[in-house]
Image (cartoon, helix red, strand yellow):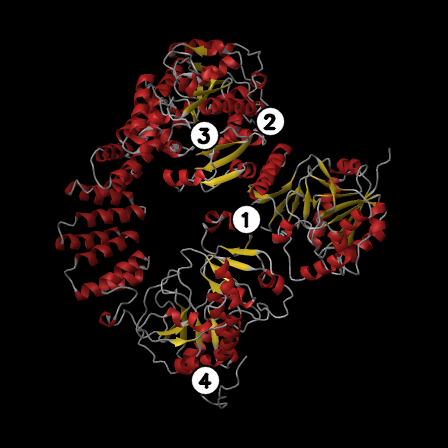
């Protein structure tokens, strides 16, 4: 059976980072038809990704940050088989969207796991949002943009809204939620360890794009409950995190029994508190 | 910007005196540091010449770094600089002759001196900071950027939501106010990462709970966010009240208090605008006053003590001692020399000069000074001892021993000198003598007894001398921790069960008074599900090796058990297991710094149904907490029975003998087989060499192996001329190696036949076993992870059969994997067994045996454990 071609689209303005992530994907996807498209002068992430879509020829499109590392030798097989059941895959996301952040609804609607590494940091963190099922969680409405994997027809059909999101925020939420609204099926992969060398903090421009997101999608968001209205909207994802000494420890922790039991603890605490 | 009122000078006027501002590297998160940099910036904007002493500045500010060329130029022009220090700086490091102290916080609050030289000009950031009676010049410097921190055009102002939580320096705030912290957004020094983000947060939040008074409080009110000052050691007083008022602030965390703060939220915004305008006027005044400041003589010494304290000292001697203690040796020498000039008969000045000489390696000079001291104060043997300690700290144990010995000989009851003397002896390779000295001193009641005991125990632990250590600990049985350590050590030596049992009873009677009543008491609690089970964990490194705790946290069904970790491990470097357990457990409490009553009180909020100390009786156990805490079922995972204590013994069935002396089943929670589970590494076992040389290994950590075992092994080596023995020192080092080597030497064994390793993890143990072909379990005790790792690596070991529950594990392990023929009934059996084994090929796959026994099945283990404790809980509450 013919293997699908995979296009990796990366907006990057740092040559070193681009070289590193390209090499990483080449290694990860060795033996698979592959093209890596670098966009080095993007006006916004949405604009850059749109250009990448136009240039791409792959059956599967991966929109990737340049500061991530995926550690799973079975990555290509996993995404290819999962895209038979789903249309868009992410690594962390939500099954309930009530505001302009993917994690705004809080628990128990957050799903996935991500590791963070700080530049020059001695340790890795593991941030567990929720792993109620393994290895994939469906019924997702939006995913974080550190790495989004989509079928070609979804990417070309939905595209990125470079007019509204002409900066570096909320392009991911808009893309994934638009796909959801268009009837595509989204999922979060829990069994693929991924390290993000950034913590994705907000800056002052986030608010501006949040307003634009609400204007565009507000009518289609989930209605917040009175409890959610009373509670301040989350400004960081609600989950559990700890620091681990190294990569080996990360892999020893990234196991279903650890992640599922941690999820039970997170959700029990939320339940008890409420 | 400059107010424009500063008169311009003529082109050829003499330039103004420059300002040298002693500023730490710029950081946006410290208002004090910002104030220093902004002062420099404002002075330069006002036409003055100002520098900061750091190269780390905000590029947006005009804050040049002070460099040599500028200083040379000022010297050439005869411009005496005006040196500005923040109040935290001790002394006058730039040796300024006109000194300004910018008081940005309470004197001494952040570690600075409590008072200053009378000629220093005090510049007050807030008048609240200056004690009554002291003159100062006001200079409130508006450090907050109101372009960001304001409440103008704020669409969120009428619909603010969410609360903020700022612990600041009060690290315990989150623990103390968990609910508030959980429902609030927590602000730290590193998050939000920018002022813009912080301002955005403050503009939309309804209240800031503040535990440390700092600039964030003012920033919040300027953004229209009321501030509740919560009880904290860092909130005891707030300042800038005279400048800014208290609008927007409240100390009452009540709806009324917050409402009142909200009503007055506009006041600071108005005050701040006013202060921004008056700043430039105050700065002009500051410039005028400072430019005409007198130039002091360059002081070699503080000028006159009569006029007030200098750095808190009231005499040359006091100053000299203070400088010595601060490590300022040059200044100390000058002050002490001045003291001798003033009062030549004062012995302390000579003594401190001797200490300084010792610290600098000048032994002869130290000798001269201490001789002078002794001639003035022949009874002050303590000064002699102190000189010895100085030499010890300076790395000269020979001189240290000399002076300490002399001091103790002159005054044998000077017990405080014994630990240093013993340490000097130890460093001079006289460890045995050091132990004798400390042992003798430890037997005498004195104020230094506990310190002496601590040193003695540390020295014995380092040697791995279990018998002596056990005896010392038991002599110190009035200290609970030594008593329990002594009991644990007894189980690793040839002590009878009866003797251990007596000591346990003694321990319980003395340290857990009323424990026997607890065994009768039933806590009526209606059956509930899930059960809350709390584990007291004393050593995460050990848990990482055993895999037991992680197995339970992962596999105890969440619907049946709520798990709590009571972290009693004081280690600062956290293991991987500790981190993973923090993810897995439902609740986590740190108790290593808490006494038993406080920990029990805090634990009551979680109302545990089952409370278990996973280490049973031992050096760091918390049986006192178990005794005080309220829980229907309490257990100690222990091979030492805790008879009649009300604390059930959790133990593997294989460790029970079924003898009549054992505890009745109602007081034990018996787990299947060994009651253990192992998480062992996927390291391939290499084929066992069957060559002539017998490579023996005792990889149980040396601290768990008694001298009797070493003697037995020495006799085995004596009978097996080509054999070698590998010994695992684990965390011990040279002193233990020397102790063990001495035993083998005494038996006529060449020490080159011994190999010492440090295997601390299961991986290291497994790799070490690959180089050996036969293991030896210690005669007494459980043998630790060395034994299962031996079997995992297909290495058989020989163990002595035992009736004592704490010594049954090695033979129980052998039985489980079908190697019962390797169980010796007496030490005499070891040699024939070795002969047999060195020829025999072990067909049985030992790794598979461990797996078949379920010892590597975490889920099975947790399931069995869950069933056993649930049943015990039901029995206890029924």
Estimate the spatial distance between the alpha carbons at disc 4 and disc 1, rounded to whole Å.
58 Å
Q: Nearer the viewer, residue A173 or B54?
A: A173
The disc placed on residue B182 is 1
Q: Nearer the viewer, residue B494 or A134?
A: A134
Estimate the spatial distance between the alpha carbons at disc 3 and disc 1, rounded to whole Å.
28 Å
Tags 1 and 2 in contact by the CB under 8 Å rule?
no
For label 4, the residue is B15
Is residue A164 found left or right of B686 in the rendered image? right
Between circles 1 and 2, the one closer to the viewer is 1
Q: Secondary structure at mark 4?
A: loop
Q: Quadrant of residue B348?
A: bottom left
Which is more N-terminal, label 1 or label 3? 1
Is residue B582 depicted above or below B380 in this figure?
above
Task: Tell me what residue is drawn at x 34 percent, y 28 percent.
Answer: B515
Q: Are marks 3 and 2 on the same chain?
A: yes
Q: Nearer the viewer, residue B207 or B57?
A: B207
Q: Secondary structure at mark 2?
A: loop
Is residue B571 depicted above or below A67 in this figure?
above
- The chain containing the residue under callout 3 comes to B
Q: Are marks 4 and 3 on the same chain?
A: yes
Other-residue count near label 4 (Cα within 10 Å), few / some / many at <14 / 14–19 / ≥20 = some
């Amino acid at each position: 059976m013919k293997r699908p071609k995979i296009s990796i689209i990366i907006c990057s303005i740092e040559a070193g980072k681009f070289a590193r992530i390209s090499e990483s994907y080449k290694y990860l996807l060795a033996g698979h038809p592959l093209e890596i498209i670098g966009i080095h002068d993007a006006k916004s992430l949405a604009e850059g990704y749109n250009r990448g879509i136009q240039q791409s020829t792959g059956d599967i499109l991966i929109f990737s940050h340049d500061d991530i590392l995926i550690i799973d030798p079975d990555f290509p097989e996993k995404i290819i088989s999962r895209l038979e059941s789903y249309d868009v895959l992410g690594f962390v996301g939500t099954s309930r969207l009530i505001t302009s952040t993917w994690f705004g609804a809080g628990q128990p609607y957050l799903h996935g796991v991500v590791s963070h590494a700080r530049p020059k940091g001695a340790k890795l963190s593991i941030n567990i949002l929720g792993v109620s099922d393994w290895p994939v969680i469906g019924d997702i409405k939006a995913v974080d943009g550190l790495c989004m994997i989509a079928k070609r027809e979804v990417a070309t059909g939905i595209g990125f809204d470079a007019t509204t999101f002409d900066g570096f925020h909320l392009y991911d939420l808009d893309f994934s939620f638009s796909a959801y609204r268009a009837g595509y099926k989204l999922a979060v992969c829990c069994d693929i360890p991924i390290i993000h060398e950034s913590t994705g903090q907000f800056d002052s421009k986030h608010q501006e794009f949040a307003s634009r997101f609400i204007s565009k999608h507000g009518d289609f968001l989930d209605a917040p409950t009175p409890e959610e209205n009373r509670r301040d909207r989350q400004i960081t994802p609600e989950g559990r995190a700890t620091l681990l000494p190294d990569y080996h420890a990360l892999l020893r922790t990234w196991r279903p029994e650890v992640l599922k039991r941690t999820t039970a603890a997170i959700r029990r605490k939320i339940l008890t508190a409420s | 910007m400059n107010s424009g009122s500063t008169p311009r000078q003529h082109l050829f006027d003499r330039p103004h005196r420059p300002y040298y501002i002693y500023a730490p590297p710029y950081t946006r998160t410290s208002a004090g540091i910002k104030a220093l940099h902004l002062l420099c910036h404002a002075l330069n904007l006002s036409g003055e010449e100002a520098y900061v002493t750091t190269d780390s500045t905000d590029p947006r500010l005009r804050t040049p770094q002070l460099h040599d060329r500028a200083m040379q130029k000022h010297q050439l022009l005869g411009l005496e600089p005006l040196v500005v220090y923040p109040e935290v700086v001790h002394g006058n490091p730039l040796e300024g002759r006109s000194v300004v102290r910018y008081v940005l916080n309470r004197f001494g609050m952040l570690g600075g001196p409590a008072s200053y030289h009378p000629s220093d000009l005090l510049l007050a950031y807030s008048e609240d900071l200056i004690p009554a009676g002291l003159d100062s010049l006001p200079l409130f410097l508006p450090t907050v950027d109101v372009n960001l921190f304001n409440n103008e055009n704020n669409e969120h102002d009428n619909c603010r939501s969410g609360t903020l939580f700022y612990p600041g320096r009060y690290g315990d705030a989150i623990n103390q106010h968990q609910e508030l912290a959980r429902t609030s957004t927590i602000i730290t020094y590193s998050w939000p990462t920018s002022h813009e983000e912080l301002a955005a947060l403050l503009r939309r939040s309804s209240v800031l709970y503040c535990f440390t008074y700092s600039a964030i409080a003012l920033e919040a009110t300027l953004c229209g966010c009321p501030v509740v000052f919560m009880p904290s050691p860092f909130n005891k007083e707030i300042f800038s009240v005279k400048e800014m008022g208290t609008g927007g602030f409240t100390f009452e965390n009540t709806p009324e208090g917050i409402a009142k703060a909200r009503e007055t939220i506009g006041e600071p915004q108005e005050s701040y605008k006013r202060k921004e305008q008056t700043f430039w006027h105050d700065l002009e005044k500051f410039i005028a006053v400072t430019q005409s400041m007198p130039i002091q003589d360059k002081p070699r010494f503080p000028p006159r003590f009569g006029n007030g304290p200098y750095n808190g000292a009231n005499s040359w001697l006091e100053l000299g001692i203070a400088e010595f203690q601060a490590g300022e040796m040059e200044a100390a020498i000058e002050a002490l020399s001045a003291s001798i000039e003033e009062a030549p008969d004062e012995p302390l000045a000579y003594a401190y000069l001797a200490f300084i000489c010792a610290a600098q390696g000048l032994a002869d000079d130290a000798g001269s000074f201490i001789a002078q001291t002794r001639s003035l104060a022949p009874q002050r043997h303590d000064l002699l001892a102190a000189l010895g300690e100085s030499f010890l700290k300076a790395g000269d144990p020979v001189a240290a021993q000399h002076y300490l010995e002399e001091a103790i000989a002159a005054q044998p009851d000077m017990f405080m000198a014994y630990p240093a003397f013993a340490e000097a002896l130890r460093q001079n390779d006289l460890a045995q003598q050091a132990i004798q000295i400390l042992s003798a001193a430890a037997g005498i009641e004195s104020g230094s007894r506990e310190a002496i005991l601590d040193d003695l125990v540390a020295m014995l632990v380092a040697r791995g001398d279990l018998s002596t250590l056990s005896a010392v600990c038991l002599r110190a049985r009035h200290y609970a921790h030594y008593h329990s350590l002594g009991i644990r050590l007894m189980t690793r030596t040839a002590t009878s069960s009866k003797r251990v049992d007596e000591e346990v009873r003694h321990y319980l009677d003395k340290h857990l008074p009323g424990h026997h009543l607890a065994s009768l008491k039933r806590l009526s609690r209606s059956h509930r599900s899930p059960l809350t089970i709390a584990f007291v964990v004393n050593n995460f490194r050990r848990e990482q090796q055993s895999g037991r705790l992680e197995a339970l946290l992962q596999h105890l069904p969440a619907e049946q058990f709520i798990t709590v970790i009571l972290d009693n491990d004081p280690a600062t470097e956290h293991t991987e297991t500790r981190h993973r357990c923090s993810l897995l457990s439902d609740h986590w409490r740190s108790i290593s710094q808490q006494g038993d009553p406080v920990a029990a009180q805090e634990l009551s909020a979680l109302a545990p149904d089952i409370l278990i100390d996973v280490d049973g009786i031992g050096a760091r156990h918390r049986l006192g907490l178990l005794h005080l805490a309220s829980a229907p079922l309490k257990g100690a995972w222990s091979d030492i029975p805790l008879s009649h204590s009300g604390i059930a013994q959790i133990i593997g069935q294989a460790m029970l003998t079924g003898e009549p002396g054992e505890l009745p089943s109602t007081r034990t929670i018996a787990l299947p087989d060994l009651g253990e589970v192992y998480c062992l590494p996927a390291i391939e076992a290499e084929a066992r060499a069957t060559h002539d040389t017998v490579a023996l290994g005792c990889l149980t950590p040396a601290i768990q192996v008694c001298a009797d075992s070493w003697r037995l092994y020495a006799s085995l080596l004596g009978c097996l001329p080509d054999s070698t023995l590998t010994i695992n020192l684990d965390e011990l080092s040279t002193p233990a190696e020397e102790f063990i080597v001495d035993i083998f030497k005494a038996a006529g064994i060449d020490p080159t036949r011994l190999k010492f390793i440090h295997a601390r993890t299961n991986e290291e143990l497994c790799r070490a076993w690959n180089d050996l072909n036969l293991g030896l379990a210690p005669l007494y005790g459980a043998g630790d992870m060395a034994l299962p790792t031996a079997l995992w690596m297909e290495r058989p070991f020989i163990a002595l059969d035992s009736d004592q529950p704490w010594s049954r594990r090695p033979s129980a392990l052998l039985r489980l994997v079908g190697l019962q023929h390797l169980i010796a009934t007496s030490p005499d059996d070891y040699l024939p067994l070795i002969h047999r084994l060195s020829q025999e090929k072990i067909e049985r796959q030992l790794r598979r045996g461990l797996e078949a026994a379920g010892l590597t099945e975490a889920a099975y283990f947790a399931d069995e454990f869950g069933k056993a404790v649930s049943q015990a809980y039901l029995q206890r509450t029924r």
